[in-house]
Amino acid sequence: MTLPPPSELGHDLRAVHLVTARYGDRVISFEGHIEVTAGHFRLAVLDPLGRKALSVDWTGNEVVFDAAPWFPAGLHPQNMLADLVLIYWPADVLQRALRPAQAGFEATGDHRTVTRNGQEIIRADFTPAAGPDAPNLDQSGAHVQFSNLAFGYSLDIRTAGLAP
């Protein structure tokens, strides 16, 4: 997928998420702080002890990752960034971004799916449901169950709070 720039989100966003990641038989919990403005995306991941595990700084042209040495190798920062784009960015933007990869994309009020060669490879289920172009994770208390079937991991993401 060609990542659409932060400006294509269409609005500013600041949120705190509680995330449980499952990869194989490993389960990892962390807190994710996201800030998106017209020209910038920032993600800070904190472990349960409050230590910085990972940061992502993306301008749309350049992505800089900084992971702690103990950050699990199976959780790739590039995938985390792509996952968040698939969750948050508008459906029409994602359609364009996935076209070069010859992947299918469907968005409804309560889920989004990416398919390749007729097989579902990514699924995101939203609670509560919102419009297909307005994922609801920027509401406090919202929840998404994200599964990357191609890479064998899932994310349980709960919005813990929002910043103005």
Image (cartoon, helix red, strand yellow):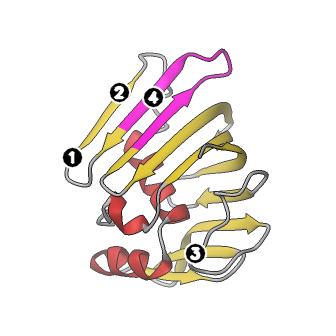
| SS at badge 2 | strand
Which residue position is annotated with label 1?
A: 62
Asked whether disc 2 touches disc 4, contact meaning CB atoms under 8 Å apart, the reply is: yes
**Mark 1 packing: few (<14 Cα in 10 Å), some, or many (20+)?**
few
Q: Is residue 48 left or right of residue 101?
A: right
Above/below status of 85 relative to 153: below
Give the residue displayed 56% in from the left and 79% down from the top.
Answer: 133
Instruction: Specify the segment rendered in magenta.
Output: 42-56
Q: Nearer the viewer, residue 14 or 106?
A: 14
Q: Is residue 62 left or right of residue 94?
A: left
Image disc number at residue 54 = 4
Asked whether disc 1 touches disc 3, contact meaning CB atoms under 8 Å apart, the reply is: no
Q: CA distance from mark 2 to mark 3?
A: 29 Å
Q: Is residue 91 left or right of residue 155?
A: left
Under mark 1, the amino acid is Glu
Which residue position is annotated with label 2?
A: 66
Give the residue displayed 53% in from the left and 63% down from the top.
Answer: 88
Q: CA distance from mark 1 to mark 4?
A: 17 Å
State the predominant SS element of the stretch in magenta. strand
Under mark 4, the amino acid is Leu
Above/below status of 105 relative to 142: below
Which residue position is annotated with label 3?
A: 113
Sequence-wise, the earlier of marks 2 and 3 is 2
Q: CA distance from mark 2 to mark 4?
A: 6 Å
| SS at badge 3 | strand
